[in-house]
Image (cartoon, helix red, strand yellow):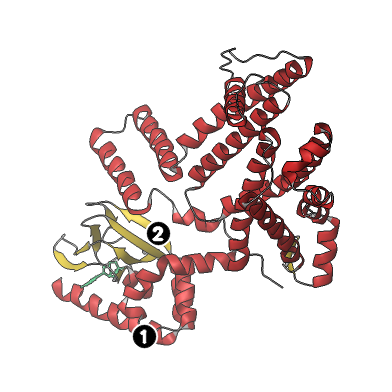
Amino acid sequence: MLHPSHSFKQTWELILILVTTYASVEVPLRLVMGYPAEGWILYVDFLVITVFAVDIIVNFRTAILVDGRLVSDPRTVALKYLRGWFLIDFLAAVPFDLILIHSIGQPEADLARLISPTLLRALRMLRLIRLLRLVRLAQLLHRLGHRDLLNPAIMRLIFFGFWVSLIGHWVGCGWVAIGGVPDAPDGLTAYVRGIYWAFTTLTTVGYGDITPHTIHQTVYAIITMIVGAGMYGYIIGNVAHLLANIDVAKAHFRQKMENVNAFLRYRHIPGELQERIRNYYNYLWESRLGYDEFSFLKDLPRSLQMEVALSLNKDILERMPILKGAPPGLVREIVLNLTPQVFTPGDTIFHYGDPGREMYMISQGTVEVLGKSREHIATLADGQFFGEVALLFHAPRNATVKAIDYCDIYSLDRQTFEEILNRYPQFAESVREMAESRKGQVRSAD
Ligand code: CMP
């Protein structure tokens, strides 16, 4: 049995989309233009039918998701398929028109002379059964939209254009079929005029140069106008929304900045502080497109949190010398409990003498360690940590730490830090060694 996300199945779905699109364009076109199925058109027809038939086999051989669980038992899959889409797929795969026309035993071009035009038309209409596949096309396009191929908003715009063109094509073909373009010299002109009528009517432009003459045409025009009015409203609303959201991250960030600016004005925050706040958001935008990793992770179940956190923080952990060769369990535990924080240049992360509630790991950026009388003690950068001394020795902070440039820092709270040290004595030993030597340096500086 095939897995639903197997690469073959994905390619197969693309082929199906192409073939179904071809069928939904060509079937009504041949009906109104009346050309016979000969030469390459006949071969393509066979190809379409073969693809639809093979798809029935593929469906019998593909595992399905039932209530979120993967079912690969062939009997259950077959039963589900037989009760669901099978009939539609089967009807679309049988070439009723070809069987009937060829069972008469004459080339299609000669049939016009043998049987009445109405009967010939009815035979050709049998091909419309193939359009049943369109129900499946909507489903396939929906699935394609969920694949990470393009920006989802652009993908939706493309689908939108696709459906609008297809609807225009059908409405135009229908108009020609009911004799809406009586004076056209040939099939192609009739088709182009039909499409022109369809789009002027659907988009509510309505030039009025092609008008209904019979009662059928009038009813058809009324229905098209009603469909067009609905479609037009839908298009305007959706396209505006899609265009505004092509860049989801940017739209989200713009909204956030509008709220921030409104708040800053409302509370009369001093100009210099406003500037720093804006700089902070600009940095968030440049470094992570304004996304907040923490709240994103919080929404996920714990098992997924772990995997996402590991993939997000892999870089910083690989860069930390203290974690070189650490057991995977330790790394996992640290990763899961890290809280990302951003500091802008000049921010004080904590002051000398503050109580210690967390330790910090620098993912990116530089901080300065300042002694009691603000003398320079050390500069720490990517992959280094600080704030461990107060936690280890249950003492107040023995130095002030300030951000020199924009810093991406991850903090680990006291309780988790202590639990980890208890569980991993070797790691505790290296942290303690480092803390002892730093404490010694601060003392000798005093
Ligand atoms: P803590 O005392 O919690 O807060 C201040 C931090 O500065 C301290 O932990 C250390 O992590 C860090 N620190 C102190 N002295 C030094 C030093 N000499 N070199 C590097 N970091 C230091």
222 lies above or below 296: above
The quadrant of the rendering that contains the N terminus is bottom right
Tell me which amino acid carries mark 1: Glu
Element class at badge 2: strand
- Residue 126 visible in rendering: yes
Q: Position of residue 282 (x, y in %)?
A: 31, 45
Q: Residue furthest bottom?
A: 426
Label 1 crowd bin: few (<14), some (14–19), many (20+), radius 10 Å: few
Q: Which mark is residue 429?
A: 1
Q: Is residue 144 above or below residue 1?
A: above
Q: CA distance from mark 1 to mark 2?
A: 26 Å
* The one of 119 and 79 positioned closer to us in this rendering: 119
- Secondary-structure class at tag 1: helix
Residue 322 in percent (x, y) is at 33, 79
Residue 373 image offset from top left, x and y in percent: 15, 60
State the residue at coordinates (32%, 59%): 408
Q: Residue at x 52, y 42 (%)?
A: 158
The quarter of the rendering in which ligand 1 is drawn is: bottom left
Quadrant where the C terminus lies? bottom left
Question: Residue under circle 2?
Answer: 340
- Quadrant hosting residue 52: bottom right
